[in-house]
Image (cartoon, rainbow, N blue to C red):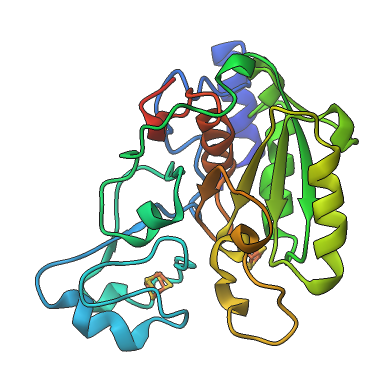
Amino acid sequence: MRPLASWIERSIARGILTTRYPRTAASEEEVPPTGRPPVAPGPPGSLAAAIPTCPVGAISETSVDRGKCIRCARCVPSGLAFAGPVEAATRSRAELAADAPLGTERAAPPLAEFGRSLHVFLVDVGSCNACNLEVLALANPFYDSQRLGIFFTNSPRHADVLLVVGVPTPEMVDPLRRAYEALPAPKAVVAVGVCPISGGVFAGTPGLAGVLADILPVDVFVPGCPPTPVAVLDGILTLAGRGRSAGGP
Ligand code: SF4
Ligand code: SF4
């Protein structure tokens, strides 16, 4: 964490506080020290050795499921490593589970026509609040999502994008469906964090209504626990074909 004085000095020197991301790649400034990139398989044999260390069953003999990985680092002593960019949004769940390079899904972005003006409605269906905080950081002066045409709205009727955090609990299924129905078409759904993607640390526990894809059509998956603001930004921009993980901006 940078001391406050160094942020102020840097802002005065640059004349602007706001990050240039995604025009430039995410640097140490954009990604806090806890913002780990996805886990990459290590040398031969390391995946098999790491399987018993993973608390969420994300590792198999052939791959790491990025839709389950909570980035706890317990597999690192077995040879696996955090590698690559923090932006890891995908257009399909299968792409997260397979050991394929990220960004290989090239279907047309669902909201390409809204590329410069995306209104986002955030729904928490059962989070630990960490994903909420990372998403809300996008509105601060550093990430300043409005410069990219991304606006948070308090009504689903004014939104193009439903951003979902947390594990879907039975009590939230109906409100979630009603919120989705209230969005005017065309609309898109983004799953933020491994909770809505796979259940994360809560997978297999009682009190879950399933994963988000069982309830709504999901257009973009943003892995992480929690994902960094940059990763969330990338996921939203992916809807318009402007995310770095999809070859943008
Ligand atoms: S970082 Fe943790 S959750 Fe992710 S693959 Fe390694 S052990 Fe599993
Ligand atoms: S993905 Fe992780 S950080 Fe986000 S709500 Fe679930 S447990 Fe919390």
- Residue nearest the viewer, comparing 188 with 192: 188
Residue 98 coordinates in the image, percent (x, y): 30, 60
Q: Residue at x 80, y 63 (%)?
A: 173
Image quadrant where residue 52 sits: bottom left
Q: Residue at x 39, y 31 (%)?
A: 246
Image vertical order of residue 104 relative to residue 51, above or below: above
Q: Is residue 74 left or right of residue 231?
A: left
Image quadrant where residue 17 sits: top right
Image vertical order of residue 8 relative to residue 164, above or below: above
Q: Is residue 51 left or right of residue 174?
A: left
- Residue nearest the viewer, comparing 120 with 129: 120
The outermost residue toward the top is 15
- Residue nearest the viewer, comparing 39 with 207: 207
Image vertical order of residue 94 relative to residue 42, above or below: above
Q: Residue at x 38, y 78 (%)?
A: 74
The outermost residue toward the left is 44
Residue 27 coordinates in the image, percent (x, y): 42, 34
Quadrant for ligand 2?
A: bottom right
Quadrant of the snapshot with the C terminus: top left
Q: Residue at x 61, y 51 (%)?
A: 192
Residue 211 coordinates in the image, percent (x, y): 62, 66
Image vertical order of residue 43 relative to residue 153, above or below: below
Q: How many marks?
A: 0
